[in-house]
Amino acid sequence: MKKLLIILILFLLPGCGQIPLSGGTAISENLKLKAPIDKILTHAETDWIVKKPHGVLENKGRIITYDYITDIQPTEKVIFQQGEIYSQMFQVSDNTFQIWGGNRPHYYKDAIGKVFKIEQNATTTIEAFAEQTKVSFFKKLIARATDYPPSGDDGERYVVYNAAADWATAHDALTGTGVSDTAGTVIDVHTEIYLSKFYINKGATPFDNSGLADDAYISSASISVYKESTGDGDNDGEDYIVAVQSTQANPNSLVVADYDQFGTTEWSNEIDIGSISAGYNTFTLVNIGTNYDQISRTGYTQVGWLEGHDHLNHAIATGANFLSFYNSRYTGTDHDPYMTITLGSPALPVVKKGEIIWFD
């Protein structure tokens, strides 16, 4: 399952019970909408982008992606802020919580308090979507538009500098040469030399931590990402991935001007690319400040990702070093990046014998 599951969905397979298009052509089963139109929350016409080697992106046409409310009720305890009907946060244990990455929710609470999972990024063709929704869809969409969060995860992408003549040009640039497509399903953290040209990709994954209490005391935190692929062409000890701060201007949008908005202070441990395994890999966050001060309690925590040579500003000598991991646009939720936070109580100060001051 590479890059885009769209590849599988868009093949027209013969099937029974097909819906006829207005032009007489039938809609195959795999292009039918996965939910009634009153459960479709948002949709967008997007490019079908496939990433090829050396940062080349191929546009294979336009499709429709949409989010919808499923009939699946989660077994986990979902945390909703007061008055909210959407959430990205659930309770793992008494003091541990998990927040899904991106800026689209994973759960919906209906008028009587029942909670259902939201499926993101289902796909179909433009023609099939138009035929199955028609005018009635837009009337229903208006009813939801006032309370559904912004559509898309434009902040959860990667910004690139491609084909620089020298390392300094690629590393020190204030502006990138491009940003990954909004329909892309991976974050590609990447450093490469190819035909004497340098390539650098910096990843961004915002996490909405507004569900935490303003005074939450955090005893530990981590971020888990699901490997799509890796490359370790320059295995020189600087071939690692690390989390840093991203100060992109808008957590809901990543643009070329954000290329220089990635810090160097390590927010996590370094993981050697050669040690990255299949499935989820967990980065343990560093306690910065007195109480994990880098984690927002009121909004987005903006996490950036760098490969070791980019982080250290040491030119890569050969090949490509990278980690590509799935973002929240990948179909379903079992590959999404997530942050785990364990809450605790601040330690009481230790008072040594002889340091007690008595007041009469």
Image (spheres, rainbow, N blue to C red):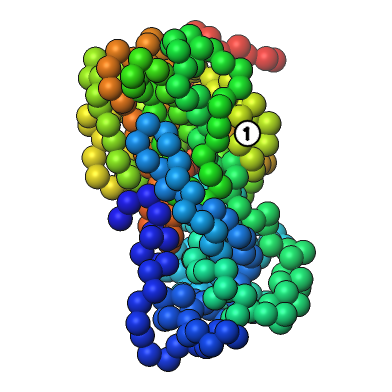
- Front residue (pair 233, 269): 233
- Nearer the observer, 109 or 333: 333
Q: Looking at the image, is 280 positioned above or below residue 46?
A: above
**Amino acid type, residue under disc 1 in the picture:** Val
Q: Locate residue 109: give its quadrant.
A: bottom right
Report the side of 189 relative to 42 (left or right).
left
Q: Residues within 10 Å of mark 1 (few under 14, many from 20)?
A: many
Occupied quadrant, residue 309: top left
Residue 318 in the image: state x and y as whole percent: 27, 17
Q: Residue at x 57, y 25 (%)?
A: 176
Would residue 250 be visible to someone looking at this image?
yes
Front residue of this view, candidates 354 and 92 = 92
Q: Quadrant of the C terminus?
A: top right
**Image position of 80 with respect to 219: above or below:** below
Residue 210 sits above or below residue 10 on the image: above
Percent x, y of residue 69: 55, 72
Residue at image x 37%, y 31%? 54
Extreme residue toward the bottom, this view = 17
Residue 243 vertical position relative to residue 264 in the rendered view, above or below: below
What is the secondary structure assignment of the residue under circle 1? loop
Answer with left or right where residue 72 lies relative to residue 14. right
Whole-percent x, y for residue 31 in the image:
46, 75
Q: Residue at x 28, y 47 (%)?
A: 279
Q: Nearer the viewer, residue 288 or 64?
A: 64
The N terminus: image quadrant: bottom left
Total marks placed: 1
Can I make out residue 220 in this image? Answer: no
Give the residue at x 56% y 27%. Answer: 177
Residue 247 % position (x, y): 62, 27
Q: Which residue is mark 1?
A: 255
